[in-house]
Amino acid sequence: MISLSRTCFLNKASIAGLSSPFSDRQRGIVPKAPCSLKIKAAAAAAASNRDRNGTVLAVETVTKEMAEAESLIDDSQPTVAGGIRDAYGEDAATEDQPVTPWSLSVACGYSLLRDPRHNKGLAFTDKERDAHYLLGLLPPSVPSQELQVKKLMNIIRQYQVPLQKYMYMMDLQERNERLFYKLLIDHVEEMLPIVYTPTVGEACQKYGSIFSRPQGLYISLKEKGRILEVLRNWPEKNIQVIVVTDGQRILGLGDLGCQGMGIPVGKLSLYTALGGVRPSACLPITIDVGTNNEKLLDDEFYIGLRQRRATGQEYDELLHEFMTAVKQNYGERVLVQFEDFANHNAFDLLAKYGTTHLVFNDDIQGTAAVVLSGLMAALKLLGGTLADHRFLFLGAGEAGTGIAELIALEISKQVQCPDDYYYCLLFLVNVMQGLIVESRKESLQHFKKPWAHDHEPVETLLEAVNDIKPTVLIGTSGVGRTFTQEVVEAMASFNEKPLILALSNPTSQSECTAEQAYTWTNGRAIYASGSPFPPVEYEGQTYVPGQSNNAYIFPGLGLGLIMSGTIRVHDDMLLAASEALAAQVTQENLDNGQIYPPFTNIRKISAHIAANVAAKAYELGLATRLPRPKDLVAYAESCMYSPSYRNYR
Ligand SMILES: NC(=O)C1=CN([C@@H]2O[C@H](COP(=O)(O)OP(=O)(O)OC[C@H]3O[C@@H](n4cnc5c(N)ncnc54)[C@H](OP(=O)(O)O)[C@@H]3O)[C@@H](O)[C@H]2O)C=CC1
Ligand SMILES: CC(=O)C(=O)O
Ligand SMILES: [Mg+2]
């Protein structure tokens, strides 16, 4: 007798309590009436342990129930389709009875080793190997997960080229998801630059050439009118966070079209590793409306649509269909994070969907929150309040104006004055207009207009620095090495501790390096960059630069929104996230010139951010998960995904 648990197919209809129970197509045998209930109960038990493919793990109870059921099977009756009837499957139905044509399979044996969500590699215990038909499929050794991580780190460290490490990590993610996250969490400082900036930037540039297995969902113009159908092709149904890009402004690398997919994939791996959102709830999406990158259009390995970008109505309609389908498929509480859109679309999408969906723009809002947090911490070193400082930005796009907006909001709350007054403390320079001034207001994009000062035109950054004498210089231009020696020295000439934030990514686009900042200011700069720089030795002292990157914010912010069931993002939640992050900076960090806590503590940090954001959501009446947990930090921690292997029955 063949055991049903060996073939491991469970019919979904039976699990839902519908007419047809198990299907074992090779056999087709009918049980006597009493056993079908037992089988249903076994199937229901298994169904509670379902994976993203609708697959369930083999469990002893199911096996036992099935064996019992099998003993009751009567295989004497023919089926309507010929052969022998199978009471567990569709063959039990008469020709005119509808049947459900799909089945749930229990991951076991060879397929279990190839199921990234459940695979443990060599770490399957002897008992698990026995119960799940793995005998002989693995060599005898049973290492712990920790030992597996150690071995993989040895391998990864042997690769000299970061892109090779990236590819190894992506392969691991596709092979053994828990091991991927365990390794990433346990070695976060070392691995963040691989799965995230700067290496993810190079990966996107070369995505077509290194492409092996697809990750995430691709929605192109070809799918117009069928986006809901596309979403339904994704195997997971309970999605909590979507990170979506259209690939037009990938880091500071410009338009990478469909190859921008590396960014949503990378950001969502941080949602899990840093914020504890379970991987099955995360959905990376790239919307492909073409690319204006001629190099990619000519690249034989390019993976996207070979056409120039759709704009205007065609673009808007596709995005609207997407946003509508997302809400229809996943409901009101799914978080949509817009990532690396070009600024004109980014601001429009945020304004358009901010009132109808739970949306968040990481480049505008996440960056603003991380920078404001750095400023709050830096005040402990610089002295004064935010309103006592003067901020000059190189780059008046998403990041620059987003940061300026949040600083202005925070100052206006602190001193209870209208925002306008504080615009005089915030100056932005962009490529076309130099310093943004009133006389050029007409030619400005709408999101720059509020920042137009009544000031003489100033063409260059150096002139602006000398004229405005900022205490804080912020680079959000996407252009590398634009904080020249003269600019940095000028900052140091009138500031005891010039605060220099070179936020552009990846490393090649950083406005100045950490070494330059410390050297050109004789070690007086407080410096942080968007992509990480190693510690700098200068005149016998070691300086550890900080990383001012929205990765500190979005995982915790997202967790806070999800765990409270928040339905809209409010600016006060960004302020709450900033405060929570700043509160995690210790005196020791500050004494070392660091305005951010180390990433090694990021899960604790994210729990605090999540709790503060959720508290604000409850306060504003935007949270729907009631009652409010008393201890939100503890609750956030309890919600976090753990990458440790689970024991299989
Ligand atoms: N550290 C972090 O967490 C984050 C970093 N970033 C980085 O910030 C950079 C900018 O991103 P984002 O704001 O979204 O991009 P945008 O395209 O929206 O903005 C770029 C701005 O820089 C200006 N600019 C470009 N070149 C120069 C130049 N040579 N001199 C002066 N101004 C210039 C542009 O001018 P104009 O308006 O005339 O076009 C524009 O105002 C990227 O490198 C990105 O990776 C972004 C988000 C988060
Ligand atoms: C960090 C980030 O979001 C960016 O550079 O675009
Ligand atoms: Mg971004």
Image: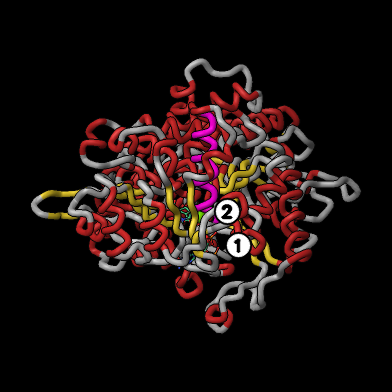
Task: Give the residues drawn in magenta, as a range.
Answer: 397-413
Question: What's the residue type where badge 2 is placed?
Answer: Ala
The quarter holding residue 421 reads top right
Among the 4 quarters of the image, the one containing residue 357: top right
Tell whether circle 2 marks a residue whose Cβ is less than 8 angstroms from ligand 1.
Answer: no
Is residue 195 visible to the viewer in this orientation of the structure? no
- Residue 184 lies in magenta, yes or no? no
Which numbered marker is on residue 452?
2
CB under 8 Å between discs 2 and 1: yes
Residue at (12, 49) in percent of width and height: 541
Which residue was labeled with disc 1? 440
Mark 2 element type: loop
Q: Nearer the viewer, residue 161 or 402?
A: 402
Image coordinates for residue 493, horizontal then vertical, percent:
26, 53
- Image coloring type: secondary structure
- 594 horizontally vs 369: left or right: left
- Place of residue 553 in the rendered image (x, y in percent of width and height, measured from the top left): 46, 41
